[in-house]
């Protein structure tokens, strides 16, 4: 199990010798003591990336792509180890790490491996006698900060387009969950990634993360995490006016109309909120039900939520594991109390499981709260746990007002058989993503990101490649003549 920093192609201890334990959220036992990077370690990583950048950026794009394709193959070859590391460190049920996290990680690297030699500039029609074309050039050294909820997958989302475009990377995984990212670094070396192109520096957000955002030699910082931290990243980035990409919090509305297929909506809504214990920025945390079907929907939804198998994340039968940390468990439970204080009704859950075998872990039951108003804190603030807020509406206008009634604009969903309504709401909802008669679908080719307090910029697809390049406009005087307005 790798537990050191990965700098310039080697695993090394932090210069100051600092470490931090990473815990199994099932029982809070220590998995490993992981090196914690300080500012001087970040400097070493940035210097290694600077040295590697000229050769990496000028390497044939197809050759860069082949390395990423080999990495995708190695991820699949090491799928079981990666799945177990991810589950052990984060609390993801093993069944999900095997069937979703690892395959999505390999697919993302494979997508951008294939895109590396297919990303091109444009030729622009300008005035007669001139040829104008654009070049897409890598930024240089980019800093990336990966969150603790999906560390393996986000490592691919961040690194894939950056590397395909010719950048070198200094990536900081969350101090809570660094193990799967360090394993990917090991596999990158095996895939033939040149030393210094990728550097992984686990560390505290307030130290290593802050310094990555401030560092004068880093040309871009990409961050996924809380909105509050995102604002601090923007402030720190002003030191050298670096490019910033932010994927932040969410409070996803999941709207069920009275003409929806209720069986599909009930099951899809459970997936929207309870997958990964609700620790997802795109989770469908606000269940917005048409008042005509609200009772019937809840009559089906409540028993389903209560039937979810909560347990040890390494048990293949577990459907919902522990939250990733004791701090997050306590935060989630505090929001249940806030909801009660504001007049909300807890319809299910709202407490740790009664099972004594889970008492030492970070568990919270699937929780359903009926809010008094869409302005209540439980319906406005990101809880980041297995807690869904139930709201009702009378008509399309009220549904839209509730959907757009927060500062966030990341994921959203709606369930209806009315095609006209579906397209109209998809247009009018303030969100970067809208799922119709589904929820939480992602693909490496489809842009992922939000608006408002959910950040800006996009992961995945051609949009992600654009985020990791700058545009250079080249003008050629093809006639080699002095234009009349230059003559004297």
Image (tube, rainbow, N blue to C red):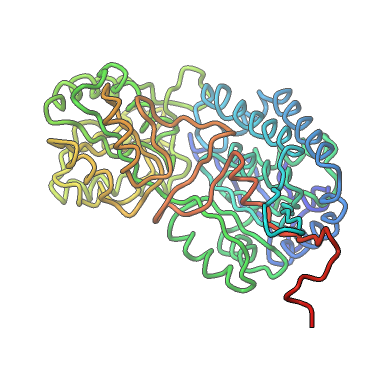
Residue 288 placed where, x, y %?
23, 35
Residue 20 placed where, x, y %?
62, 53
Q: Is residue 151 above or below residue 238?
A: above
Q: Residue at x 80, y 60 (%)?
A: 476
Residue 101 showing in the rendered view: yes
The furthest residue to the bottom: 488
Of residues 459 and 283, the one nearer the viewer is 459
Residue 158 placed where, x, y %?
63, 45
Residue 365 showing in the rendered view: no
Residue 1 placed where, x, y %?
71, 37
User: From the image, which quarter does the C terminus lie in?
Assistant: bottom right
Q: Residue at x 71, y 29 (%)?
A: 75
Q: Is residue 321 above or below residue 167?
A: above
Q: Is residue 201 above or below residue 278?
A: below
Q: Is residue 457 left or right of residue 468?
A: left
Of residues 339 and 292, the one nearer the viewer is 292
Q: Is residue 455 left or right of residue 100?
A: left
Q: Is residue 23 left or right of residue 139?
A: left
Q: Residue at x 59, y 58 (%)?
A: 204
Of residues 311 and 274, the one nearer the viewer is 274
Q: Residue at x 44, y 34 (%)?
A: 322
Of residues 460 and 83, the one nearer the viewer is 460
Total marks shown come to 0
């Amino acid at each position: 199990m790798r537990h050191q920093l990965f700098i310039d192609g080697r695993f090394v201890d932090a210069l100051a010798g600092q470490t931090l334990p990473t815990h199994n959220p099932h029982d809070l036992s220590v998995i490993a003591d992981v090196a914690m990077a300080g500012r001087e370690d970040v400097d070493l990583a940035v210097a290694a990336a600077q040295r590697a950048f000229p050769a990496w950026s000028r390497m044939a794009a197809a050759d860069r792509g082949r390395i990423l394709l080999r990495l995708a193959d190695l991820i699949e070859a090491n799928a079981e180890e990666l799945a177990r590391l991810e589950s052990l460190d984060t609390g993801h049920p093993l069944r999900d790490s095997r069937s979703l996290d690892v395959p999505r990680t390999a697919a993302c690297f494979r997508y951008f491996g294939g895109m590396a030699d297919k990303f091109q500039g444009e030729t622009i029609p300008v005035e007669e006698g001139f040829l104008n074309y654009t070049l897409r050039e890598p930024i240089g050294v980019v800093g990336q900060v990966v969150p603790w909820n999906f560390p393996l997958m986000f490592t691919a989302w961040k690194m894939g387009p950056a590397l395909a475009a010719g950048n070198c990377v200094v990536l900081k995984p969350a101090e809570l969950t660094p193990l799967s990212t360090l394993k990917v670094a090991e596999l990158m070396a095996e895939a033939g990634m040149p030393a210094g192109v990728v550097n992984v520096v686990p560390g505290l957000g307030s130290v290593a993360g802050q310094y990555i955002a401030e560092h004068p030699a880093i040309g871009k910082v990409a961050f996924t995490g809380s909105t509050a931290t995102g604002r601090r990243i923007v402030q720190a980035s002003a030191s050298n006016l670096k490019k910033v990409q932010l994927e932040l919090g969410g409070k996803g509305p999941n709207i069920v109309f009275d003409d929806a297929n209720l069986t599909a909506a009930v099951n899809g809504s459970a997936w929207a909120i309870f997958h990964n214990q609700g620790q997802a920025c795109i989770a469908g945390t606000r269940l917005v039900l048409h008042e005509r079907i609200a009772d019937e929907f809840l009559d089906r939804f409540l028993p389903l939520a209560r039937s979810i198998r909560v347990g040890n994340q390494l048990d293949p039968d577990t459907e919902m594991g522990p939250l990733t940390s004791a701090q997050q468990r306590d935060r989630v439970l505090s929001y249940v109390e806030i909801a009660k204080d504001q007049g909300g009704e807890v319809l299910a859950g709202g407490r740790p499981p009664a099972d004594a075998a889970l008492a030492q872990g970070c568990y919270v039951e699937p929780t359903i709260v009926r809010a008094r108003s869409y302005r209540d804190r439980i319906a406005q603030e990101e809880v980041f746990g297995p807690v869904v807020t139930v709201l009702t509406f009378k008509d399309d206008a009220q549904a839209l007002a509730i959907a757009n009634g927060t500062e966030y604009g990341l994921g959203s969903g709606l369930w209806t058989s009315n095609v006209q309504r579906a397209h109209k709401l998809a247009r009018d909802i303030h969100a970067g993503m809208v799922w119709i008669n589904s929820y939480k679908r992602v693909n490496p080719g489809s842009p992922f990101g939000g608006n408002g307090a959910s950040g800006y910029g996009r992961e995945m697809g051609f949009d992600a490649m654009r985020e990791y390049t700058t545009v250079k406009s080249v003008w050629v005087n093809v006639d080699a003549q002095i234009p009349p307005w230059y003559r004297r």
